Amino acid sequence: MKFFVDTANIKEIMEAQEWGIVDGVTTNPTLLAKEKENPLDVIKGIVKTVNGPVSVEVISTDSKNMVVEGRGFAKIADNIVIKIPITKEGLKATNVLSKEGIKVNVTLIFSTNQAILANKAGAAYVSPFIGRLDDIGNEGVNIVKDIVKIFNIHSASTEVIVASIRQPLHVTEAAKIGAHIATIPFNVLEKMVYHPLTDKGLTIFLDDWKKIKKRV
Ligand code: E4P
């Protein structure tokens, strides 16, 4: 499973890159707003830092302007992927951009039928939001299970990005299902590294080593 970092924070991206685990980045308007800088400058910084795909979301809601925005973002760098919400207008824009060879990540997916439509329209990626489904009492991971199963049955080329990941268990579940990609916030990546027995074990090893050195 590929790991994307779900952030627009360049420091977080660079830190995760040093761990050797970053295959790409996803941003959205909320994440870019958190950076309190010119979003275009932030995006340009990210695409220079990361080799893999970097998703950038359009703000327009009509297909004509989504296409204009998408073409504009795509000119910034070869690794830009245009994030488009799953609406009727979004499908139209996905159809146009994908035919021009621009990769589209259809976002805000909450049902299998939305994912099927995005695939048909030419999406390179679909992003089901599992955390937000959990929030309303659904088991978000089930939708990923179904989308992956359907895409596998039909040998669909669209990759499934598990999005709205809120906790390490979501990542394990995504991997068990066979999702292509998990896009993970930096705080969840940090939690994935941590285990109390690792810290305890390391303390014991270091203490024991100090004892040996004293005797020598
Ligand atoms: C990424 O593509 C999504 O925009 C992101 O994972 C949404 O996460 P949230 O539901 O925690 O805002």
Image (cartoon, rainbow, N blue to C red):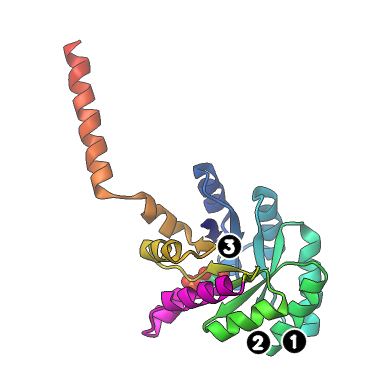
Residue plotted at (37% across, 49% down): 193
Mark 2: few/some/many CA within 10 Å (<14, 14-19, 20+)? some
| Residue 167 sits above or below residue 113 on the image | above
Q: Give the quarter of the image for residue 157.
A: bottom right
Q: Which residues are magenta?
A: 127-154
Q: Is residue 76 left or right of residue 49?
A: right
Task: State the image coordinates of residue 59 (x, y, percent, origin top left).
Answer: 69, 78
| Residue 138 sits above or below residue 192 on the image | below
Sequence order check: which comes first, mark 1 or mark 2?
A: 1
Q: Which residue is mark 1?
A: 62
Residue plotted at (39% across, 83% down): 138
Q: Give the quarter of the image for residue 139.
A: bottom left
Q: Which residue is mark 3?
A: 35
**Three-letter code for the amino acid on which mark 1 is drawn:** Asp
Specify the label residue 87 is tagged with. 2
Residue plotted at (54% across, 56% down): 2
| Residue 29 sits above or below residue 11 on the image | below
Ligand 1 within 8 Å, label 3 CB: no
Of the pair 180 and 26, the residue shown nearer to us: 180
Task: State the image coordinates of residue 160 (x, y, percent, origin top left).
Answer: 56, 69
Indicate the secondary structure of the residue bearing disc 2. loop
What is the CA distance from the residue labelled 2 to the residue labelled 3? 27 Å
Placement of the C terminus among the 4 image quadrants: top left
Q: Is residue 10 left or right of residue 211?
A: right
What is the CA distance from the residue labelled 1 to the residue labelled 3? 26 Å
